Image (cartoon, rainbow, N blue to C red):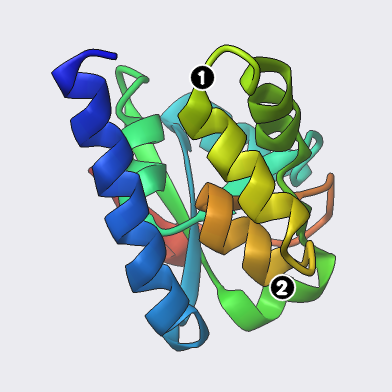
Amino acid sequence: MSEDIRKMINKVKNFKQFVNENIDNFEYLYHGTSLKNTKNIIQYGFSDDTYWGDKNTAEQYANSYSDPILIRLPKNEIFDQLEPNTTLINFYEDNAEYDEDYKDVIDNWENSNKTIVDSLDIFGSAILPPSNIQIDKSNLIEI
């Protein structure tokens, strides 16, 4: 395994420890996207599953677009609608036999209560299914 990948894994492990200690203190959850997608979300709502987590992770994802935007919502407004991040669960399960670190992540998930908090802790995100949650410019953060 390359040194860069090892560093990334260590960052995730350190972040997981931070999340374990601070998950209840998060006031907001973030979704990283593009300006174009944001305009559609404002007009039509969330028509697809969206991924929500900490600001850092959302920012990294948003930066994959040429016009990155973060959508920020109070955690208490969406928490009851969130689901575990099955996309990442499936990815780690599919690759666990090839990488010991992926296997460790899946073991952590299998040994958890498999709650939203566990999804945020272990995978750094959770899924918000399609919804009509209203957002406006006050929810947007340009990066």
Residue 105 occupies quadrant = top right
Residue 3: image location, x then y, percent: 15, 20
In the image, taking residue 96 as reference, residue 101 lies left or right, namely left
Circle 2 or circle 1, nearest the eye = 1
> Considering the numbered disc 2 on the image, is that residue within a helix, a strand or a loop?
helix
Can I make out residue 39 in this image? no
User: Can you say which quadrant of the picture contains the C terminus?
Assistant: top left
Residue 17: image location, x then y, percent: 36, 68
Residue 119 occupies quadrant = bottom right
Q: Amino acid at mark 2?
A: Phe
Q: Name the one closer to the observer, 109 or 132.
A: 109
> Considering the numbered disc 1 on the image, is that residue within a helix, a strand or a loop?
loop
Q: Name the one closer to the observer, 1 or 76.
A: 1
Would you name the residue on which mark 1 appears?
A: 99
Q: How many marks?
A: 2
Residue 80: image location, x then y, percent: 81, 74
Q: Name the one closer to the observer, 29 or 141.
A: 29
The disc placed on residue 76 is none
For the point 63% across and 17% down, which residue is it?
95
Q: Amino acid at mark 1?
A: Asp
For the point 51% across and 65% down, which residue is it?
29
For the point 45% across and 75% down, which residue is it?
20
| Mark 2 or mark 1: whose residue is earlier in sequence | 2
Would you name the residue on which mark 2 appears?
A: 79
Q: Name the one closer to the observer, 51 or 68.
A: 51
